[in-house]
Image: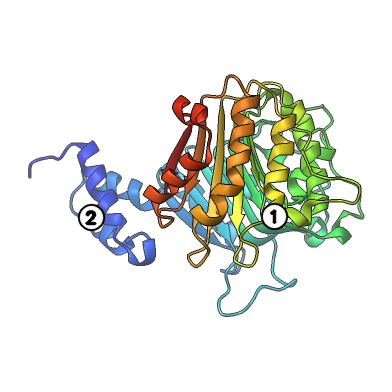
Amino acid sequence: MIPIPTEILTLILNFVGERGFAGLVDWESLSSCSRVCRGWKPVAQAVLCKEQYLNLAHRPAPCKRYIQFLRSSPSVAAFVRVLHIYYNDYPRYSSDEDPPLKPYLLFKILRLLPRLHTLDVKDTFLAGWPWSSPLPRNPIRLRSLRLEAVRYHPRKARNCVPFDFLSLFEVDDLESSRNSLDQKGFSAPSLTRREPACFVVRELKVSRSDPFVSFNHKHGGLDCERIQRLCLKPLTAEDVSFHTSLVRRYGPHLSHLELKIDDVSALKKPGIVCPTFDIASCLSLETLKLSYYCHRHKPTDERYSEVYRSILAATSTSLRELTFNIVLCFDSPEFCQFVAPMLAPVIVYAATRFPELETILLVVPDWALPDESVATMEELLPENITKRGLVQFTFV
């Protein structure tokens, strides 16, 4: 049999593995490929084991059994790149009686996966750290950490207390959304490190007043000099206050800021005309991304224009790129009819205020009639701005 180069064989087996139902890995085909010959076995196993799923509903003690498996199969552990941890006991809905994910067991699992780069924790309870055990000194290095719909209940496991979960990691991209907090679990004292430490996250994505980011924020926060990109999605006026404190702390070293504003009316507090998120603290900001949601019941919300102008008025003049991400429904009115007239004055203001601005990018759904959208925006903008070639469209 003529040997196939490893790089080509990996591409072939990756294609075979992606043919599974509903985007899942085709386990059966890859298992068959691993038994073809000795040369194919390690390549097929690497493709087969690179992404793994740990369902906490598979009792008893799924984490402990997974640890035993990794210790008994170190060659398989070296193949794992992505780990998904979740709770799914279909068709039964999750309840408060479900067992939690214990962070000290999670830490043991991650120590056994030397080449892991992505951890995804979703739809589960998270317990605290054992009060009698010190927190680990060396964090786990990851490219991406995603926490979604995680209910933080520190006292759900016996002899556990609240602690800063983010302190276990050093990550490039942290995304935390739709998480919740059990206030009863915080009646006990929190476990903190004896030595002061700032934990490294380079890109932070936060939705609402996230409990994990909030707890970390109250206990020293992240390394201000290492974080470069911040993405915020506030839904209420309380979220604005929390996100403003994040911008104030990390702003001086940020190069990119993204604000996903869904409903402008829900963000305003009495006595505050427009939230600016204290963006003036972002002294070296180079790129700013703002989102516009064209709601079916309120297609022409002029308050977006007011909020955008307030944010731009407080932004440093060093801005080089401004992006508007336009989110439309399939049955929403056309971009030309409602969104373009609202954005045109904001674009004119931005072009005037920022002398170093190189690009104003409009990200628009491709069903918004691309040719007509570009023509409409050019008609609404002054000739001096259109000649500069500032405004560019991307249809997705």
Q: Nearer the viewer, residue 220 or 279?
A: 279
Upstream in sequence: badge 1 or badge 2: 2
Image spot of residue 289 (x, y percent): 59, 38
Residue 75 in the figure: left or right of residue 57: left
Image spot of residue 130 (x, y percent): 79, 49
> Which residue reaches farthest bottom?
91
| Quadrant in which the N terminus is drawn | top left
Residue placed under numbered mark 2 in the picture:
33
Image spot of residue 205 (x, y percent): 64, 43
Mark 1 Cα-neighbour bin, 10 Å: few <14, some 14–19, many ≥20: some
**Residue at the (35%, 46%) spot, across then down:** 46
Residue placed under numbered mark 1 in the picture:
102
**Does the image show residue 223?**
no
Residue 317: image tag: none
Q: Nearer the viewer, residue 107 or 121?
A: 121
User: Helix, strand or loop at disc 2?
Assistant: helix
Image spot of residue 226 (x, y percent): 66, 25
> Which residue reaches farthest left?
1
Residue 364 in the figure: left or right of residue 269: left
Q: Amino acid at mark 2?
A: Cys
**Does the image show residue 316?**
yes
**Residue at the (44%, 55%) spot, across then down:** 368
